[in-house]
């Protein structure tokens, strides 16, 4: 009897602890990711709009990906935080918001993910030994490919607007449609783009190795024919390849962690009791991991690329000088006006003979 009581007490304490941890995690986690992510995305904007990167196709994909990453974390996390902790009931009372919220939290990360995929394809093309393939790595094609990715992203998720509704809470049609939607999220947003990223990342590494072998065969000829601008462009391309590989690796790790558990949660039998509590904790944790993927890019680029760090610091220095320069100009003008007024006052108080 005493043993049963102790076991029951321990179980109750454990459940209470898990609930507290889950509540704290779902409150502070989104706030931390929001702050880190917004700062990182703004820093990406500053860096990828630099003159030396503005016309690079891969940098353009990174820039547009940062735009959709910012939209993903701000809309997704703020709306989730409002529903979980700020008392918002809009998602379960407004049909339009129910549909649009689920639609956007799927579309925005999807587009950001596929833009990173396009960057990996671009690096594969730019590193190819084939002149024809390298010709596809240019800014004009990047513009068209980005528009295509955005259109495909919005169209591919259109079924969400049909399947989700107030029932009476915001939810999806049960049965076959729910299974289809779950597999759509797992494969179209998780498995397919990240497998393709890894494939093109591997092919890019192979291209680099082939290029090194060709350079080793005729080193003097290759060096002699390269201009200073071409060497600078090669260094930029090499740094962007490193950034892309690190971005792909960490993105695959974080997103697939979420997708693996989400697939298990959907396909496994319904959880009850203590297992349901653990399942709720893991679902909340993997959701934060998923959103962390869209807040990490600036920090990955900074740690992996000397070029990115250099461009970022130069851009920050440029903006600081511009801001401080304007501030100094205002101060100088104020001082000049003050000196003129002081001089006029002195002349009035102490007039000269002439």
Image (cartoon, rainbow, N blue to C red):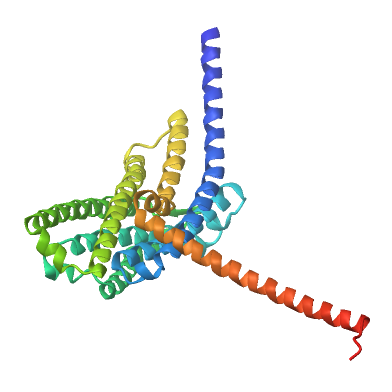
Instruction: Please state if 307 lies on the left or on the right of 191 as rendered.
Output: right
Q: Position of residue 285 (x, y in %)?
A: 45, 40
Q: Is residue 167 visible?
A: no
Quadrant where the C terminus sits is bottom right
Instruction: Please state if 284 lies on the left or on the right of 249 as rendered.
Output: right
Q: Position of residue 287 (x, y in %)?
A: 43, 46
Q: Nearer the viewer, residue 184 or 282?
A: 282
Instruction: Please state if 191 lies on the left or on the right of 330 as rendered.
Output: left
Q: Residue at x 31, y 49 (%)?
A: 246
Q: Is residue 200 visible?
A: yes
Say which quarter of the image contains residue 134.
bottom left
Compared to residue 290, the image places residue 140 above or below, namely: below
Compared to residue 345, the image places residue 10 above or below, namely: above
Q: Nearer the viewer, residue 235 or 194?
A: 235
Q: Position of residue 251 (x, y in %)?
A: 34, 49
Q: Nearer the viewer, residue 133 or 176?
A: 133
Residue lying at the far left in this picture: please name it: 217
Residue lying at the far front in this picture: please name it: 353
Q: Position of residue 56 (x, y in %)?
A: 31, 68
Q: Residue at x 43, y 37 (%)?
A: 282
Compared to residue 219, the image places residue 51 above or below, namely: below
């Amino acid at each position: 009897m005493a043993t049963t009581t102790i076991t029951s007490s321990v179980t109750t304490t454990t459940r209470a602890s898990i609930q507290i941890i889950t509540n704290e995690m779902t409150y502070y986690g989104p706030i931390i990711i929001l702050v880190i992510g917004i700062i990182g995305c703004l820093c990406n904007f500053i860096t990828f709009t630099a003159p030396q990167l503005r016309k690079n196709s891969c940098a353009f994909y990174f820039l547009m990906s940062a735009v959709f990453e910012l939209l993903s974390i701000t809309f997704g996390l703020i709306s989730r935080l409002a529903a979980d902790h700020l008392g918002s009931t809009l998602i379960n009372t407004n049909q339009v918001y129910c549909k649009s919220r689920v639609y956007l939290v799927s579309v925005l990360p999807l587009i950001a993910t596929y833009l990173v995929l396009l960057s990996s394809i671009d690096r594969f093309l730019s590193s190819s030994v084939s002149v024809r393939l390298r010709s596809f790595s240019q800014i004009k094609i990047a513009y068209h490919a980005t528009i295509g990715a955005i259109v495909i992203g919005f169209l591919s998720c259109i079924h969400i607007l049909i399947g989700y509704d107030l029932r009476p809470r915001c939810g999806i049609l049960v049965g076959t449609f729910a299974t289809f939607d779950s597999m759509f999220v797992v494969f179209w947003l998780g498995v397919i783009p990240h497998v393709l990223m890894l494939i093109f990342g591997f092919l890019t590494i192979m291209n680099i190795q082939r290029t090194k072998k060709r350079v080793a065969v005729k080193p003097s000829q290759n060096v002699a024919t390269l201009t200073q601008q071409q060497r600078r462009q090669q260094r930029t391309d090499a740094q962007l390849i490193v950034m892309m590989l690190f971005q792909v690796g960490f993105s695959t790790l974080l997103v697939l962690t979420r997708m693996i558990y989400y697939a298990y949660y959907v396909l496994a039998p319904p959880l009850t009791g203590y297992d349901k509590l653990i399942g709720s904790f893991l679902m909340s944790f993997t959701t934060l991991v998923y959103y962390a993927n869209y807040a990490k890019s600036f920090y990955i680029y900074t740690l992996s690329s000397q070029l990115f760090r250099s461009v970022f610091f130069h851009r920050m220095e440029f903006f600081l000088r511009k801001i401080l320069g304007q501030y100094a100009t205002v101060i100088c003008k104020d001082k000049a006006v003050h000196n003129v007024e002081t001089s006029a006052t002195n002349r009035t108080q102490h007039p000269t003979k002439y």
